[in-house]
Image (cartoon, grey):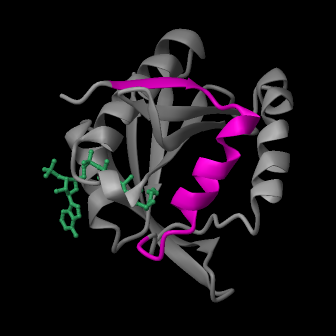
Amino acid sequence: MPKIKLRLQRVSDAKRFFEILNSPNFTYFNVKPKSIEDEKNWLKQNSKRRKNNTEWNYTILFDDEIVGAIGIKIDYHRNYIGEIGYFVDDKFWGKGIATKAVKLAENICFKQLNLKRIQIIVHPKNKASKKVAIKNKYLKEGLLRKTIQGRSGKMEDRYLYAKAL
Ligand SMILES: CC(C)(COP(=O)(O)OP(=O)(O)OC[C@H]1O[C@@H](n2cnc3c(N)ncnc32)[C@H](O)[C@@H]1OP(=O)(O)O)[C@@H](O)C(=O)NCCC(=O)NCCS
């Protein structure tokens, strides 16, 4: 298993996140910051998100190098449900980094945030992400029809994977 750690995101992570997120290989991921400044502004809101218990966002470190991010979004109406989302630098794909990061984030969800249920919502063609969910023993519960607005503006389907205590 690689040496993976999570720590809370910092505004100084902006440059690396900008580089990673602008990869042309991120086919099934909709977040693309327009500039490092934009990314900094987004990161600056993280403390407010934690204070309001809406989002808990972490940086993934591999041997102390920034290689990605993983976040937990708390359901607005049911604050015992969280949704995990993640990305990894394409130069580091296939090393088990996302799989381990989900395991660590899950621990935060159940032990620190007292969540009862964790969801992972995946593009039907995103084989790597489905694999990450399955390797962490998330169950495929079904297809969410027309649930997310895609880049084209059209509403798109997603698979729902989840783990419940
Ligand atoms: C999804 C993502 C985070 C996976 O990161 P990673 O660190 O490479 O993931 P892991 O190495 O832990 O596991 C990926 C698994 O998918 C497999 N995989 C990758 N591409 C695949 C493909 N096209 N078909 C089938 N399996 C594939 C890998 O072989 C690996 O499985 P294995 O360990 O059995 O070999 C990464 O691809 C990414 O950042 N993608 C862009 C952002 C994104 O789509 N995020 C998910 C949003 S839900």
Asked if residue 137 lies left or right of residue 45, the reply is: left
For the residue pair 10 and 136, the one nearer the viewer reads as 10
**What residue do we see at 59% from left, 69% from top?**
30
Instruction: Answer whether residue 19 is magenta in the image.
Output: yes
Give the residues in magenta: 4-25
Vertical order, 48 against 69 (above or below): above
Where, quadrant-wise, is the N terminus in this rendering? Answer: top left
Q: Position of residue 127 (x, y in %)?
A: 27, 65
Which residue is situated farthest in the top direction here? 111
Q: Position of residue 160 (x, y in %)?
A: 42, 55
Q: Position of residue 121 (x, y in %)?
A: 47, 55
**What residue do we see at 80% from left, 32% from top?**
49
Instruction: Answer whether residue 10 is magenta in the image.
Output: yes
**What residue do we see at 43% from left, 26% from top?**
64
**Rendered image quadrant of residue 91:** bottom left
Vertical order, 89 against 53 (above or below): below
For the residue pair 74 and 140, the one nearer the viewer reads as 74
Vertical order, 41 against 143 (above or below): above
Q: Where does ligand 1 appear, by image quarter?
A: bottom left
Q: Position of residue 126 (x, y in %)?
A: 34, 68
**What residue do we see at 63% from left, 58% from top?**
18
Asked if residue 86 lies left or right of residue 74, the reply is: left
